[in-house]
Image (tube, rainbow, N blue to C red):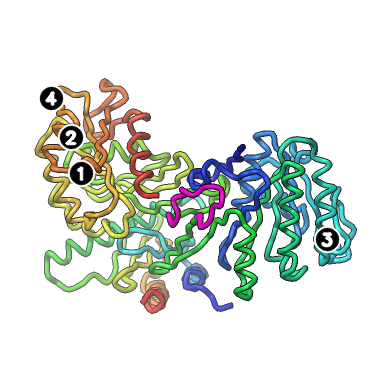
Amino acid sequence: MNTYATSIPRLDEFLDGGLKPSTLTVLWAYPGIENAPFAYQTLMERLESGDSCIYITQSKLGLTVEDEIRHYGWGIEKYKEAGKFFFLDAYSGLINAESEERFSVKNAKDITQITDALKNALDATGSGHTLVVCDSLSTLIDHCGENCLDELIKWKDIFKEKNATGFFLFTEWPYETKVLNKARLISDAIIQLKAIEEKVILREFFIVSKVSWNGKSKEGVSVPFKISVPGGVKVYIPKILVTGAYNAGKSSFVHSASTKAVSVDRVGTTVALDHGHVDYSGFSVDLFGTPGQERFDPILELLGGESLGVIAVVDSTNEQSFHRVNDMLIRSKSIGLPVVIVANKANLEGALSIDKIREKMHVSDAVPIVPVTAEDLSKVKVNEPAKLKDEDVHAVLDALFSRIV
Amino acid sequence: MPKSKKEELADLLKELENVGDIDGAAITTRDGLLVASRLPRDVNAETFAAMSATMYGAAETAVSELKKGSVKRVISEAEDCKLVAVDAGPSAAVVALVRSEANLGLVLIEILKVANATKELMK
């Protein structure tokens, strides 16, 4: 069976590859959380892969949707001109306006009219695969009543016949429980978007709570996200602590991994904090690099709170630095968090092997130790962060991210 | 719909920005995470929050070594501005960007008002 990737980081893995043909996947958001960017990003990915896309709009004009998509930095015009992307306008009728779209319904409160229009629209897309975005299922229930959910079962047959897949936006307004249960029942997959407020910092995350086409989904794993403009949906980790002994290469790591980094350092040693922002493989992460020298330990305790993971940097050539790391993990209250150990300077003379480091540090096999080396030793200057090899840095980030979400 | 805490905090910062001689402000947790900000466009708010929290924490540590009570505020005087970080309860600090020619006493009263309101909100 084909799968249609959404390109939203981590989501495709949980969906076992992506959306499945002739199914109905619901983006189930709690009030106050935007779910449309998930649909925009997915439809852009599908259009780029050669699919067609029909956007059923019920609460705004097509032009407004196009503006929003452009706002995230995606060029929708060429697909519209090529006839690959078009709207099914179920809105203009409500405000007694003449629709400017190719497909529209006169009475948007009559679900059978929408069904007929959808059939016509799908006939126009040819034999290739079509993504049908419905914005939104909640509006559909509001306008057409809860019986429209029965009609949606027919839509799935239409999808099957016309090689299409449904991606529906839904906001959980206070509906009756039986309506919610029915909506859950007719969906083949559900992606829930939730938010929690921790010390007034709002964290949003998504969970795949239902996937009917695979029994082995990693259910219950929640992925924190933020929506960046431009860029779309990113997995968001607000704090990763980068710690380790003096002169192990923490600043080098923060600077090499980050798209943008700043440091407070004097004569080559960090006295307060390295802060770097990482944009990598759909992740948006802020790195907090601590000072290494013991006299700055109060700062370490201060900044350690609320991290979601730790990168512990050790100097492979300096055994003394190994014990210090354990001490620092305790001080920053990071014991128990996902941790990756970076064995820096792995190609220098006197560097210990990974197994030796593991043995000396007394860490279990479950903790990854990743060897890291500088890009060009001749360019490493005293008192300045070195540029580490990209592939090494990425290996560290991959190892850590897979342990967090 | 009642306002979320986040919106209320954003409103507080807006109020602060309306005070003359204040060019921007941010609320940060003591461990360096950004809560809310209204800063000039070219400022990276996350970095600014992390560094301000570090500055405040370092001052607290230095003072606690002296055993002379707790820190109430940290003021950094730069060439073109003053940076004023004030205590806003055990988990947060308010940092304001003040013009160098400002009357610090008057501006400080406004910043303290906002800091107190922040403290109440974040309880």
Say which label, 1 or 2, has the lower sequence index.
1
Closer-to-camera residue (A239/A31): A31
Kind of residue at badge 4: Gly
Which residue is disc 3 drawn over? A112
Closer-to-camera residue (A146/A404): A146
Q: Nearer the viewer, mark 4 or mark 3?
A: 3
- Asked if marks 4 and 3 fall on the same chain, the answer is yes
Which residue is disc 2 drawn over? A315
Label 2 sits on a secondary structure element that is strand
Residue A217 forms part of the magenta stretch: yes
Label 3 sits on a secondary structure element that is helix
Which residue is disc 4 drawn over? A350
Circle 1 residues within 10 Å: few <14, some 14–19, many ≥20: many
Circle 4 residues within 10 Å: few <14, some 14–19, many ≥20: few
Please report, as a chain letter, where disc 4 is located. A
Closer-to-camera residue (B4/B44): B4
Say which label, 4 or 1, has the lower sequence index.
1
Q: CA distance from mark 4 to mark 1?
A: 19 Å
Q: CA distance from mark 3 to mark 1?
A: 64 Å
Q: CA distance from mark 3 to mark 2?
A: 68 Å
Q: Which residues are magenta?
A: A208-221
- Asked if marks 3 and 1 fall on the same chain, the answer is yes
- The image's mark for residue A244 is 1
- Asked if marks 4 and 2 fall on the same chain, the answer is yes
- Helix, strand or loop for the magenta stretch, by majority: loop
Kind of residue at badge 3: Thr
Q: Disc 3 vs disc 2: Cβ atoms closer than 8 Å?
A: no
